[in-house]
Amino acid sequence: MSDICDSSNPSLTLDFTMTYRILFVCMGNICRSPTADGVLRQRLREAFLEGVVSVDSAGTHAYHVGEPPDARSQKHALARGYDLSPLRARKLVAEDVEQFDLILTMDWDNQHLTESICGASPRIRRFAEFFQRHTDTVVPDPYAGGPAGFEQVLDLVEDGCEGLLRHLATPAVLNRCLPEWRHLPEERCIERAWRWPDFRAAMAFLQQVAAHADAQDHHPEIWNVYNQVRLRLSTHDAQGLTHKDLALAAAIDRLESPA
């Protein structure tokens, strides 16, 4: 479900220079995959990860290319606060397997067809693998059914998006997104060090870090001696690092580099 073609909303243009890229795939790209696309975009905005992770969706068939999501999908999603209206359907292409880090299919047929189009790849997985509470193995197609089917899709998609946020804090993703940071799994943290021209520059940097940390309700561990700064991030979650650590680290990486 690409918004690349939506010239009326250029702010939503998909930027393939972003760090970690996720693609959702269903059959026609008007019900399940755009719902997942819209829900995850919203969750990423709320988690301060909009500039770290990009999202798109596509269909294995070209039935609805250029069309908006199904009106029923839009209606049920909007009732939960997700606006799918800017999205437009597109067909999956072979090149997608090189453009995306994770391609998530909605059911076994989608999985088979995606592998037929893109070739077998460990990047291609079922979205259901990321469910946290549900035991369903697929996201069923609601197209031929009634309102309950669209609500079920949203329930499963919201659950899967929670799993994806957890996935963003795994070592492989952290290393991909934060190459300048050291991941210390035994201490459940990530850290990075800087050497600034002088004490004043170091303090200015730390003030910017503090502003980002306050905005994200995070509390980094800070070590500073004159012009040297080391930050250690951990949300002290029972299961280790979370997406909040990734979000703050990425924000810090975008700050001005030492002179």
Image (cartoon, rainbow, N blue to C red):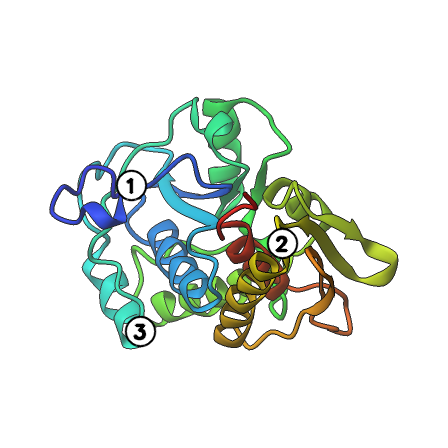
Residue identified by numbered label 3? 81
- Alpha carbons under labels 1 and 3: distance apart: 20 Å
Upstream in sequence: badge 1 or badge 2: 1
Local packing at callout 1 (Cα closer than 10 Å; few below 14, some 14-19, many 20+) is: many
Q: Is residue 64 left or right of residue 36?
A: left
Q: Position of residue 34 (x, y in %)?
A: 33, 52
Q: Is residue 151 visible?
A: yes
Query: Which residue sits at x=49%, y=71%?
Result: 211
The amino acid beneath tag 1 is Ser
Label 1, label 2: how many angstroms apart (C-alpha)? 46 Å
Q: Earlier in the sequence, mark 1 or mark 3?
A: 1
Task: Say the numbered circle drawn on residue 2.
Answer: 1
Residue placed at 24% from the left, 63% from the top?
74
Cα distance between the residues tagged 2 and 3: 47 Å
**Eye-nearest disc, 2 or 3:** 2
Q: Earlier in the sequence, mark 2 or mark 3?
A: 3
Question: Which amino acid does the dot numbered 2 rest on?
Answer: Asp
Q: Which residue is mark 2?
A: 198
Residue type at mark 3: give it.
Answer: Gly
| Quarter of the image where the C terminus is located | top right
**Nearest the eye: 210 or 100:** 210
